[in-house]
Amino acid sequence: MAQTGQVAVDGLLRILDLEKLGEDEFLGNSPEVGSALQRVFGGQVAGQALVAAGRTVEPTRRVHSLHGYFVRPGDPAVPITFQVENIRDGRSFSVRRSVARQHGKTIFFMSASFQVTEAGLDHHVSAPPDVPPPDEVPTMAERLARYPERLGIWSMIPRPIDVRYVGEPGWVRPGDRPVAARQQVWMRIDGKLPDDPLLHACALTYASDLTLLDAVLNQHGEVWGPGGLVGASLDHALWFHRSFRADEWFLYDCSSPSASGGRGLATGQLFTVDGRHIASAVQEGLLRRVG
């Protein structure tokens, strides 16, 4: 069975704990899941790229935004090297460029900006009303029990994130997913994380890539896989607004303003249980009909 709980979280921590090769160069690995994965999960390489960038910045400067592009699919059987370029260290901001490479080619690159904590204006949008709390939403295990054909892949991949869909997920059978304007998912790291704010930001980056493109399919009642579509992330942007813990529940409220030309755009707002707006995400993905 797939690893869950603290065991899976400890595995995620090992993946995010990059080996330092030089002053600005790091080495990362993927989970050992045999041939279950044909390519590296995008959230993993983005989270690792942020770890690499963050380790070259003073801890007093916290990441506030990142913008990344997925250039090539990553090979899960091969380590990933991360090269960090120091773009600028100013009085308040530091900017880094983090490039992930395999087989001598770039598979992903990211720009990330870090800021000294400052006081200023403060407002945010309200969390969506009438969303059931996470303990009233089916667990992943309860969802999967309805779809035994999905157990093969899910039984092999570690699940360090507790993911609970408010509506139907994108991996149900064709016809089982109604058209919906929003995709809402409760998430949290399924165990305890250390207190390092950079680590929580990297874990949130990892989680933010899990379900965002589902919002595009939601608009059409579509699903992933046979009878539906296949997809791949093209780019991903994330803004961190307020302090948070990724091992506490947050709501990922997503929608899709547009889809055309084989691409779909999705946006997401992330809220704590008490309604604090902690982050915003935007992603465009490639979407193609199976067959």
Image: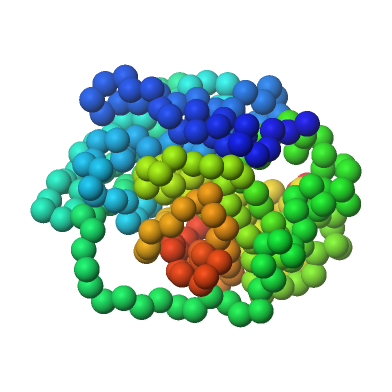
Q: Nearer the viewer, residue 62 or 27?
A: 62
Where is residue 65? Give x, y as percent: 34, 55
Quadrant of the drawing holding the N terminus: top right
Reply above or below: 169 against 200. below
Q: Does residue 215 show up? A: yes
Reply above or below: 69 against 40. below
Where is residue 86? Give x, y as percent: 20, 39
**Which residue: 37% across, 64% down?**
241
Q: Does residue 259 show up? A: no
Where is residue 104? Give x, y as percent: 40, 22
**Residue 209 located left or right of residue 123:** right
Where is residue 131? Give x, y as percent: 66, 73
**Residue 11 located left or right of residue 196:** right
**Residue 289 located left or right of residue 208:** right
Q: Nearer the viewer, residue 16 or 175?
A: 16
Instruction: Indicate the colouring scheme.
Output: rainbow
Q: Nearer the viewer, residue 287 or 122?
A: 122
**Residue 80 located left or right of residue 157:** left
